[in-house]
Image (cartoon, rainbow, N blue to C red):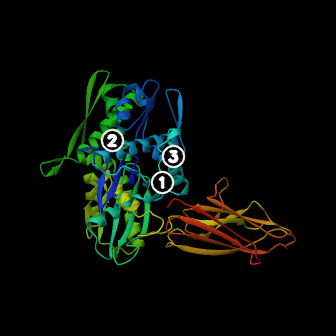
Amino acid sequence: MKLGIDFGTSFSLPAVTVLDTSVVLLPGGKYGIPSVFYYDEWEGVLVGEAAENAGQGEEAANLKREIKLELNSTFTADGRVFTARQIVGYILNHVKENALSAARAKLINEELEGVVISVPAAFGHNEKEFIREAAETPVEEGGPGLKVLGFIKEPVAAALAYFKTSLADKTRILVYDLGGGTCDAAIVEADSSLKEKYTVIDSDMRRVGGKDWDACLETYILESLEQQSGISLKENPGYREKIKRAAVSAKHAFSEKVGEKYRDRVRARVEINGKSYQVPITSEEFGKMTFSLLWDTIEMIMALLKKNDANSVSQIICVGGSSNMPQVIEGIKKIFPQMELRVFEPEKSIAIGASIYAGYCNGKDTFLSDMAAFSYGSDCCRNYDVDPNDKIVINLIQRGDRLPVTRQHRFITTRDGQTRMRFDIYESDKEVQQYDFVPGKQPVMQIVLELPPGLPKGTAAVLYLTLTTDGIIEAVADDGNGHSIKVQKRLNY
């Protein structure tokens, strides 16, 4: 069994595809596994619903949400410090255990061969490597002990799930994925006559998601409650958690229908010091307070369509739990009236698509043609004689290049008698040939070419960079006189 895991900011979901049938591996009626972590000395580590249930009142200070957006952080609960990698590992282990349990119940072979994990479209090597390390932490060290077969962009995974149910040759769609923490979009084309049946034309991401809609409602509710009660609530973790839950509940209520129409007003209810308070909110007020968030995501769609021939895109497919909000669908329809718009399995499509992709991660076949999500280049001195610390990065591979791609650049030695040339390869989102080096930035890989002694300044060597469809970057440095070196590394594509 090869799992696909939608590792979400708010919820995570496992799925498997067996005999061309995709199955979500959760108990019936479950929306997903909350990507939430909790710890106290009495309860120990709790994840998912158990964490949600424990993290109420004063214990809300021990609750950690949205770790996916804070991968470089630490979290202290009840005097114990947890790294983000540990927390991600706990969540993925909980997802794995739920998946295995559901597989047993559905009589699916539960021998786990590996997983594909979905990630936001703009996650780079470092973020993917972080998640890989957390997922592959051995069981004896408290980790999930998973074998990560690969990663897939969230909107691309959703596109695979959609095309599986509605594949038409040479169909090009734009997937709009509004999740809990990010909004991702990708233009994907399907052509079953090709070996690589699916081609990613372009993709982009904004760090805006359902949590930002929640935050707007939280602020609105908090200010109203403080005015009604005369109590300062901002610094109280227990009250803030109550308000957060009331905001999420109100947001979901706006997505419910009464008869044929969506609710146009809701009441957020919060108990403070034993007294129940109510905050009325209309859909119009909710739309106004979150309009800038929605517009940010719509501008991303507009930019992608403008860049990639809007007339070639036949449909906009909306996925992600936050796409259930009526204001999102209505806003997109209003701006793109000429486009057919479909809401497709908002909560499940990414996990299903990841499981479909997992079935093809065997090191032999390819069925997805992607583009370089980032640029890759080597640093060098602008003018060593003037200032040896004045460095630039020259991009050989640029963001948007169709994979596989190979590029080369000629570099020269900066000193007489130089016996080695070191190339630090950097990843960036800069779509330019060269840019100023950022001090402190860490390279994704390094290659060192050894040279014979006695060479004059200005001796040339050529650096070749290759990026493959399965995320292998290869660097070859060659001086043309029999001295060369090759280094390969997986970039977690």
Percent across and percent down for residue 148 are: 48, 54
Three-letter residue code for mark 1: Val
Q: CA distance from mark 2 to mark 1?
A: 37 Å
Q: Residues within 10 Å of mark 2 (few under 14, many from 20)?
A: many
Q: What amino acid is found at the position of numbered circle 3 in the picture?
A: Ala
Judging by the rendered image, the residue that carries numbered circle 2 is 217
Find residue 131 and report its horizontal and vertical position in percent. Answer: 50, 50
Query: Element type at marker 1?
Result: strand
Q: Residue at x 48, y 46 (%)?
A: 145
First along the sequence among labels 2 and 3: 3
Residue under pointer 1? 148
Please name which of the two marks, 2 or 3, marks the residue nearer to the observer.
Answer: 3
Which residue occupies the foreground of this view, 224 or 71?
71
Front one among 233 and 180: 180
Of tags 2 and 1, which is closer to the observer?
1
Amino acid carrying label 2: it is Leu
Give the class, few, some or many, for how many residues have Cα within 10 Å of label 1's Cα (few <14, many ≥20). Answer: many
Cα–Cα span, label 2 and label 3: 33 Å
Rendering coords of residue 82 (x, y %): 52, 36
Q: How far apart are labels 1 and 3 at the CA level?
A: 10 Å
Near mark 3 (Cα within 10 A), the count class, few <14, some 14-19 or many ≥20, is many
Q: Is residue 210 above or below residue 319?
A: above
